[in-house]
Amino acid sequence: MIRIWLLTAFTVLCVALAAYQHHWSREVTPSGPWQVELAGKFAERGEYPSANESSVNSIQRWGSWNGNDDFKGELRIGPFPARAGIKFYVSGYPSRPGNELYLEMVDLDFKLPLNVRDSGESWQVFETELPLGWRGRRVRLVAMDGSVRPGGWLAISEPLRTQHDSIMQGGLVSAIAALLLVASALAPGYSYFSNWIRRSGAIPLHWVPTFTFGAIALLGYFCFWAYLAHTLLGKVFSVAF
């Protein structure tokens, strides 16, 4: 009975957390507010009008088009602490010669180029994990338009929350799942040994849980040595007990 309840709770909780996590990862949620520096023709909502503009209506964005592909400019967002990943919307032609899109580590003046493909006159989501050495560092997101060729503009949005930012992705789901899985696996053995010890009457009732867990731990120890001796012996021991 205990095992059924634990397995049911485990399944329901994991499904609920997975559904919430999926919903979280689809949300367009800014992770600001931001300190923004603009130079040249970079301006808020300065991108080319696009067919899917409604996807970015609720967030801040900046572009260098402003009515002409020949305009130049520079955008700096931050500094802000780098997380496990970075995510933002981008449009235009960031890969054109003269254009740059990168993260800048403020303290050490390092650059991390962001290889974003051109999306033209529409918005696409760019998301990537950051190297371990960058996480927790103060960084800026930098976009530079140095191109005067046709289609030489680019635009980006403010950084958004990524699935790496969610505590659901930071180990909580794994921890809860592991605890419930261990509990569901130990429940049958605990129930059997505790009932057997109670019926024997050899142990005071308040010591029953301690002796029960001790018996389970001892079986686990024997199982370890059985597997160490031979894989088949370990499997037989696991199935038998």
Image (cartoon, helix red, strand yellow):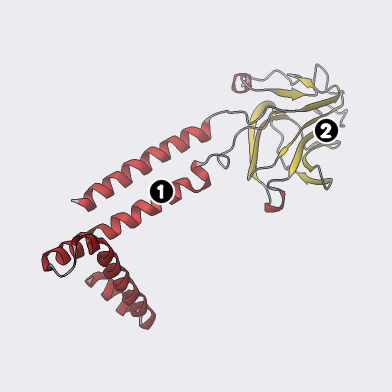
Residue type at the position of mark 2 = Met
The amino acid at mark 1 is Ile
| Residue appearing at x 15%, y 66% in the figure | 196
The answer to whether residue 154 of the structure is visible from this angle is: no
Q: Residues within 10 Å of mark 2 (few under 14, many from 20)?
A: many
**Labels in figure, total:** 2
Q: Position of residue 35 (x, y in %)?
A: 76, 28
At x 47%, y 36%, the residue is: 22
Question: What percent of the width, then of the height, locates residue 85?
Answer: 64, 43
Residue position for label 1: 176
For the point 23% across and 47% down, which residue is it?
Answer: 5
> Which marked residue is nearer to the observer: mark 1 or mark 2?
1
In-image side of 115 versus 52 (left or right): right
Instruction: State left or right for residue 118 relative to residue 177.
Output: right
The C terminus lies in which quarter of the figure?
bottom left
Confirm whether residue 82 shows in the render. Answer: yes
In the rendered structure, which disc, 1 or 2, sits on the residue that comes first in sequence?
2
Closer to us: 141 or 183: 183
Q: Is residue 95 left or right of residue 31?
A: right
Viewer-side residue, 195 vs 159: 195
Q: Residues within 10 Å of mark 1 (few under 14, many from 20)?
A: some
State the SS at label 1: helix
The residue carrying mark 2 is 144
Near-viewer residue (216 or 171)? 216
